[in-house]
Image: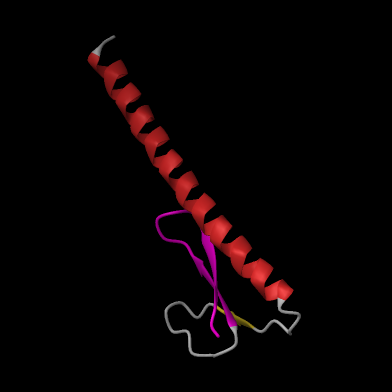
Amino acid sequence: MDLNESLQLNEYLECKKQNLHKEEVLRKISAKNNNVITKLLSDNKPIKLELGAGQERQLEGWTTIDIRCETFRSQIRLQCLE
């Protein structure tokens, strides 16, 4: 294996490692969102959605949906304020 092939293999392995990390983070976000959704649906109350509030959540009793396009392609996080 020459130097060029070795560099390509190292780049591939680093990319694979980053993708595995992203998948793990997205799995955790998905699990948390599933818990929030299950709770919202089980309450049998109207669901009020606040879209794109980011860290500026201010509406008590509303569910914030924050879509981010930072490190990972896009993340959708739900947070329920009570």
Tell me the chief SS of the magenta region.
Answer: strand
Please, is residue 46 above or below residue 34 in the view?
below
Q: Of residues 48 and 53, which is closer to you in this image?
A: 48
Q: Kindly identify the residue that appears in the image at 71 percent across and 79 percent down.
A: 43
Q: Residue at x 54, y 61 (%)?
A: 32
Q: Position of residue 46 (x, y in %)?
A: 73, 85
Colouring method of the image: secondary structure
The residue sitting at 54% across, 90% down in the picture is 59
- Between 37 and 69, the one lying in front of the other is 37
In the rendered view, tell whether residue 9 sits above or below residue 47.
above
Residue 41 x/y as whole percent: 72, 73
Give percent across and percent down for residue 76. Answer: 55, 64
Question: Image point 36% across, 29% down: which residue?
Answer: 13
- 77 part of magenta stretch: yes
In magenta stretch: residue 40: no
In the image, which residues are magenta? Answer: 63-82
Whether 70 is drawn above or below 27: the answer is below
Q: Quadrant of the C terminus?
A: bottom right
